Amino acid sequence: MAERVCLVTGAGRGIGRAVAADLSAAGHPVVLVSRSRDQLEETAAALSGPSMIVPADLTDLAAVEKVYAEVEAGFGSVEILVVSAGTAAGAPIHRTSDELWESILAVNLTAPFRCIRRAVPSMKQRGYGRIVVIGSVLSKTGAPYTSAYAASKHGVLGLVRAVAAELAGSGVTANAVCPAYVDTPMTEGTVQAIVEITRLSPEQARERLERMQPIGRLITVEEVARVVRLLVDDETGSITGQGLNVDGGTVMS
């Protein structure tokens, strides 16, 4: 592929860091966005090609415009957008507060929407764009104590499908990647929550998550990054409007 300007949110750690490394290894300049400058600097130091660090809280509407303005001034228009930033928290539905609901949707759904909205005009003008949002197996199913998170991830899948339908034939594609439990700091938070609720040991809690996936282990960040790369490298634009599972057989669809 030709070099393309990439913007990766949530690039400070986990899936976002792995995606940024993979895109950089493929020769693309990568813009790294997350709230933590320190984590972004760690990611940038590990990349093989040019990168730009733009710390930002994308739940702030003004921050989205600021990020894109810096990218366009430094690298040019965004051609590949990977939205990986996400958050998770669990609670029974009757204990899911408005604050919890709104905070999860702000990060997992509203911020991706705003990033896509800002990227699309220049992508359409160029006749090329690749949009990938990190969803979840909970984009396609439900689980106890996840009402806010599952709603946000179902919304992500609906968002990319609507965008894909709207932009079909323009050279711009939009897809979601839907992993099960991935070996990331976010999953470590889930492990800790299980420990607090059940009094299992951390090892037992992690094993419980592993057993939820038919392959008997957590997904790696590199496995998710490879599927993102598949969508980015689709030269003909024939893969669009999809939610590709990376889940070890958890949700077969």
Image: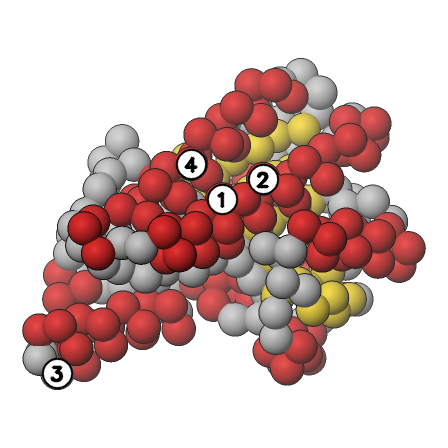
Q: What SS does tag 3 mark?
A: loop
Q: Earlier along the polypeptide chain: callout 3 or callout 2?
A: 2
Question: Which amino acid lies under the numbered mark 1 shown in the image of this protein?
Answer: Leu
Question: Which amino acid lies under the numbered mark 3 shown in the image of this protein?
Answer: Ser
Q: What SS does tag 1 mark?
A: helix
Q: Position of residue 132 (x, y in %)?
A: 56, 42
Q: Earlier along the polypeptide chain: callout 4 or callout 2?
A: 2
Residue 12 falls in image quadrant: bottom right
Residue indicated by mark 1 = 109
Residue indicated by mark 3 = 201
Quarter of the figure that contains the N terminus: top right
Q: CA distance from mark 1 to mark 2?
A: 6 Å
Question: Which amino acid lies under the numbered mark 4 shown in the image of this protein?
Answer: Gly
Q: Is residue 34 above or below residue 60?
A: below
The disc label shown at residue 155, or none: 4
Residue indicated by mark 2 = 113
Q: CA distance from mark 1 to mark 4?
A: 7 Å
Residues at marks 1 and 2 touching, judged by CB atoms closer than 8 Å: yes
Seen in the image, is 51 located left or right of residue 147? right
Q: CA distance from mark 3 to mark 2?
A: 38 Å
Q: Position of residue 9 (x, y in %)?
A: 61, 57
Q: Is residue 125 above or below residue 27?
A: above
